[in-house]
C-alpha cells in the first residue's frame, strides 16, 4: 500500500501494543563494499529482501566515495579489498561519521585479523563463507541497534 517497512525482526523488539498509529521507520541505508561481484550481488539482494536500501561498491575507494556522497546508517565491508583496504575504509568512516554501524567481513579469520577488525572499529565481524544468508541482515540489525542506543 505504499508504506515502507524496516528490516524484518521475527518478533524481536516488536512493540507489544502493536504500534497502532505509528509510522514504520524508514529503511536504513546500507553501503556494501565487496570486490567480488557475485558475492556483492548476493549480499545486496539479501539485504534488500530484509528491507534495507542498499548501495553497492566494488572496492575501498569506490566505497569511500559512495559513503561521502550518501547518508548511510550502516556499512558492510570486506577487509581485503584492492586499493584502499577495508580496515582503512573503516578507520576513515569512524573519523567522518563515528556513529555509522559497521559490519566487517573476512575470509581469513586468524586471531590477528579478527582482533584488528574489532580494534579498528567494527560493530560486528562475520567470517566468510557465512553460516547462512540471514547472518548478514541479522549482523546489520545488531550493529544498527548498538549505534542507535549510543545516540
Image (cartoon, rainbow, N blue to C red):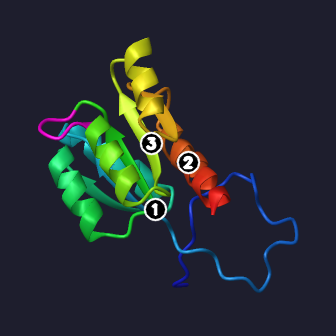
Contact? badges 1 and 2 (CB < 8 Å): no
Name the foreground residue: 49 vs 137.
137
Measured in 3D between alpha carbons, the distance from the residue under mark 3 to the one under mark 1, in whole angstroms, is: 11 Å
Q: In this view, does 129 lie above or below 74?
A: above
Q: Is residue 70 magenta?
A: no
Contact? badges 3 and 1 (CB < 8 Å): no
Contact? badges 3 and 2 (CB < 8 Å): yes
Q: Name the residue under label 2.
A: 143
Q: Can residue 60 be seen in this view?
A: yes
**Relative to 136, is 66 on the left or the right?**
left
Q: Image point 48% across, 41% down: which residue?
A: 136
Image coords of residue 3 (percent x, y): 55, 81
**Relative to 12, is 124 on the left or the right?**
left
Q: Image point 48% across, 31% down: which residue?
A: 118
Q: Image point 19% across, 60% down: which residue?
A: 65
- Element under disc 3: strand
**Relative to 64, is 112 on the left or the right?**
right
Q: Is residue 84 magenta?
A: yes
- Element under disc 2: helix
Image coords of residue 80 (percent x, y): 24, 30
Q: Mark 1 points at which residue?
A: 73
- Element under disc 1: loop
Quarter of the N terminus within the rendering: bottom right
The magenta-colored residue range is 81-86
Q: Residue furthest front?
A: 95
Q: Name the residue under label 3.
A: 103
N-term mark: 3 or 2 = 3
Amino acid at each position: 500500500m505504499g508504506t515502507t517497512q524496516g528490516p524484518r525482526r521475527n518478533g524481536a523488539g516488536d512493540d507489544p501494543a502493536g504500534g497502532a498509529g505509528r509510522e514504520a521507520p524508514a529503511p536504513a541505508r546500507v553501503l556494501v563494499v565487496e570486490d567480488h561481484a557475485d558475492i556483492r550481488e548476493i549480499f545486496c539482494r539479501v539485504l534488500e529482501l530484509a528491507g534495507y536500501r542498499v548501495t553497492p561498491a566494488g572496492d575501498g575507494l569506490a566505497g569511500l566515495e559512495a559513503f561521502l556522497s550518501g547518508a548511510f546508517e550502516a556499512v558492510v565491508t570486506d577487509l581485503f579489498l584492492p586499493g584502499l583496504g577495508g580496515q582503512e575504509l573503516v578507520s576513515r568512516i569512524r573519523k567522518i561519521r563515528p556513529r555509522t554501524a559497521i559490519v566487517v567481513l573476512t575470509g581469513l579469520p586468524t586471531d590477528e585479523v579478527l582482533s584488528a577488525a574489532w580494534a579498528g572499529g567494527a560493530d560486528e565481524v562475520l567470517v566468510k563463507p557465512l553460516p547462512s544468508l540471514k547472518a548478514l541482515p541479522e549482523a546489520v540489525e545488531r550493529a544498527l541497534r548498538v549505534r542507535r542506543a549510543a545516540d
